[in-house]
Amino acid sequence: MKMDPGSTFIRAIVVAVVLAIVAAVSTVMGAYPTLIAITIMVFFVYSLSWSLLANTGMVSLGQALFFALGAYAYGIFAISYGMNPIAALFAGPVTGALAGLVVGFISARLRDWYVGIFTFALTPAGYALAVSSQLQPWTAGAIGLATPRFPLASSLLLPFATALAFVAYLVIMIIKRRRIGYALSAINNDETAAGTVGINTRLYKTMVFGISGYMAALAGAMFVALYTSYIAPDYFGYPDISYSVWPIFYSMIGGMGSPEGVLLGTVLLDPLETAIRSWLSGISVVGGNLALVIFGLLLVVVLLKAPKGIYGYVTRYVESRRARARRAAEASAKAEVGTGQ
């Protein structure tokens, strides 16, 4: 079913306003909240990349592979090849797109959780390559890679990240309204039926992996360029799995059925994750792992109460209120007509 252009426009305006409010409020609050806001923009893009796959029926548990590839490619292009960091920010994620096409070509022949198992198995392979002696001249091995300062004033980093996040949202909305979006929706609903009506399921699944790979890699490049200026091998999601699971938590708790739900989950949970991790790290050496446990429990609770996430629950509640209001208005109108007669 086609999306209403008017509704799509309104949703885009709302998302733009929400992103702008997050950026403005964070800037007013100070330097540290501004950094948190940058991570919100980064992980919104990252979570959109995961949600795009999940809404096609492919659950990736190794999305950190593309995230790390984008981060490393950005650093290598800027350091080893002297590319302008701004150009490297967009060129580096091409490696994620290419890797996505390869992974998608293989995953297109798999079903259900076999895709998740396959993608998850790739994360230690990426880590092993990053720390290998053969690639150490480019990756700096287990030490990690320090990158040059991004050539924008500090005051412009958050607006730049916000603009990129909004563009990523628009890309997702464009995909949903084009033929590829309808094909992906059909594949998600029933892949066998989609194939019988002429949809090349393997082609579209491979394509969406390429798009998702670029977006995840862009998030990785943004994370390094605008936030950390440092690349660590554990960005591959191994042995620290947090880089693989945070986009899953943000998307599913917020509502992965829509980009707006992904935004809601990221805006609510990314600052919460930072606060919990900081608090737990002060009382335990395994604070990061405890944060994962807490969010895992939160995910279970949300899915039991609201299978479509917080955004789906709120949307359903608003729609039910509107339906009751319409029924009440119709009943009142009928009563007035009856009284008049």
Image (cartoon, rainbow, N blue to C red):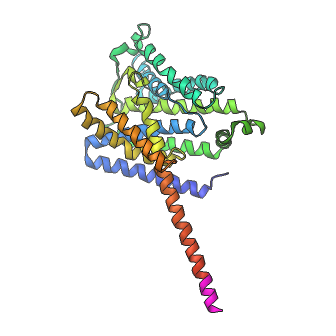
Looking at this view, name the residue that lies furthest to the top.
Answer: 134
Identify the image quadrant of residue 319. bottom right
Check the image and report above or below for 116 versus 125.
below
What type of secondary structure mainly makes up the magenta span?
Answer: helix
Q: Residue 216 placed where, x, y %?
A: 49, 32
Question: Across the whole image, how many numbered discs are drawn on residues?
Answer: 0
Q: Is residue 176 left or right of residue 289?
A: right
Q: Is residue 123 left or right of residue 157?
A: right
Check the image and report above or below for 115 versus 335.
above
Q: Is residue 8 left or right of residue 244?
A: right
Q: Is residue 160 visible?
A: no
The residue lying at 39 percent from left, 21 percent from top is 239
Check the image and report above or below for 310 versus 217.
below
Q: Is residue 148 visible?
A: yes
Frontmost residue, 92 versus 206: 206
In reply to whether residue 336 is colored magenta, the answer given is: yes
Frontmost residue, 108 versus 229: 108
Q: Is residue 166 left or right of residue 226?
A: right
Identify the image quadrant of residue 291. top left
Q: Which residues are magenta?
A: 334-341
In reply to whether residue 22 is colored magenta, the answer given is: no
Looking at this view, name the residue that lies furthest to the left.
Answer: 283
The quadrant the C terminus occupies is bottom right
Q: Residue 31 placed where, x, y %?
A: 26, 41
The residue lying at 52 percent from left, 23 percent from top is 95
The residue lying at 43 percent from left, 11 percent from top is 135
Frontmost residue, 147 versus 200: 200
Q: Residue 207 placed where, x, y %?
A: 63, 31
